Image (cartoon, rainbow, N blue to C red):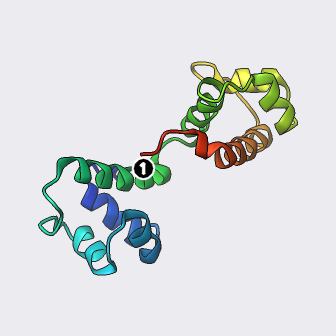
Amino acid sequence: MDEKNNVTEQLKELITVYGFNKNTLSQYLGLPLDSIEDLSNGNIDFLPDDCSYRFRLFNKISFLYASATEDKDLKLTAFLQVLLSHHGLSKKTIAAMAGVETKDIERLLSNPPKKVSEEIKFKIAVTVMSLRFFLKDCEPQL
């Protein structure tokens, strides 16, 4: 499927192709259900003219869309980098918590990433996901 650049097209694809729940979108975006439908059909006239509001709303849609379309390894390494740089966790700590070797973390972070087995990536991803969930209150809000 071609990647969409327009947020209304991205929202439409989230709903039609990926079956994303409209009630969840309504809560996440802070819009009533009928507005979700309008926005997914390209109507933005009902949105406030406030540029910062639109920027935040459109970013939220694009973040969800990127979750479906972006390279999964790239996202994993980006989340891992947040734990290392923002939260100050070490590669050794993350490796120990994931039950992998520190060299596995280093191989995943190399540019370009070196081969890491799917099993190792899974262990790292689950650990990264849980750490990001529990440490989310320490991160700046969008």
Residue at which label 1 appears: 63
User: At 18% from the left edge and 48% from the top edge, which residue is drawn?
Assistant: 51
One can see residue 1 in this view? no
Residue toward you, 114 or 83: 83
Q: Amino acid at mark 1?
A: Phe
Above or below, 37 relative to 8: below
One can see residue 15 in this view? yes
What is the x, y in percent for residue 32? Answer: 32, 77
What is the x, y in percent for residue 58? Answer: 29, 53
Farthest residue in the bottom direction? 34
Where is residue 120, by image quadrant? Answer: top right
Describe residue 40's horizontal placement relative to residue 97 as left or right.
left
Which quadrant: the N terminus? bottom left
Describe residue 104's horizontal placement relative to residue 135 as left or right.
right
User: At 28% from the left edge and 80% from the top edge, which residue is drawn?
Assistant: 34
What is the x, y in percent for residue 128? Answer: 70, 41
Helix, strand or loop for disc 1? helix
Where is residue 105, by image quadrant? Answer: top right
Residue toward you, 3 or 109: 109
What is the x, y in percent for residue 69? Answer: 45, 50
Above or below, 47 relative to 88: below
User: At 81% from the left edge and 23% from the top edge, which residue is drawn?
Assistant: 92
Describe residue 5's horizontal placement relative to residue 61 as left or right.
left
